[in-house]
Image (spheres, rainbow, N blue to C red):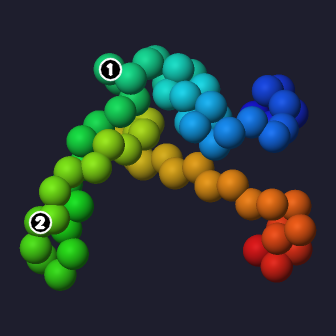
Amino acid sequence: MLRDVGTGLDLELYEEAVVQFLGGPEVALHAIEVVIDGRPLGRHKQICTPSLAGIELTALKSKDLRAF
């Protein structure tokens, strides 16, 4: 994606691109229940593939890549 879109964009723009690639917010965004130690804490919007596998994008600064 970085090669096709470019680098240095805000993380939210990459997330928006992934959502659009998957078919838009109606298809790709799901309210997932967050549970810790068996206790429900609420719901969190999550980008998911059509098979409901979650996608999480993170951003690292180039100086941190080696440590990662």
Q: Which residue is mark 1?
A: 26
The residue under label 1 is which amino acid type? Glu
Q: Earlier in the sequence, mark 1 or mark 2?
A: 1
Residue type at the position of mark 2: Pro
Q: Quadrant of the C terminus?
A: bottom right
Is any part of residue 24 visible from this angle? yes
Q: Would residue 35 appear left or right of 21 to someone viewing this image?
A: left
- Could you say which quadrant of the image residue 49 lies in? top left
Q: Is residue 52 above or below residue 41?
A: above
Whole-Å distance between the Cαs marked 1 and 2? 24 Å
Q: Residue at x 23, y 61 (%)?
A: 34
Q: Residue at x 17, y 81 (%)?
A: 37
Can residue 18 be seen here? no
Q: Is residue 6 above or below residue 45?
A: above
Instruction: Name the quadrant containing residue 46.
Output: top left
Q: Residue 10: image x %, image y %?
A: 68, 39
Q: Which percent across, then down, holds residue 1?
A: 75, 34
Residue 29 in the image: x percent, y percent?
A: 35, 33
Between 43 and 10, the one nearer to me in the picture: 10
Label 1 packing within 10 angstroms: few (<14), some (14-19), many (20+): few
Position of residue 60 in the picture relative to residue 35 (left or right)? right
Disc 2 is placed on an element classified as strand
Q: Which residue is mark 2?
A: 40
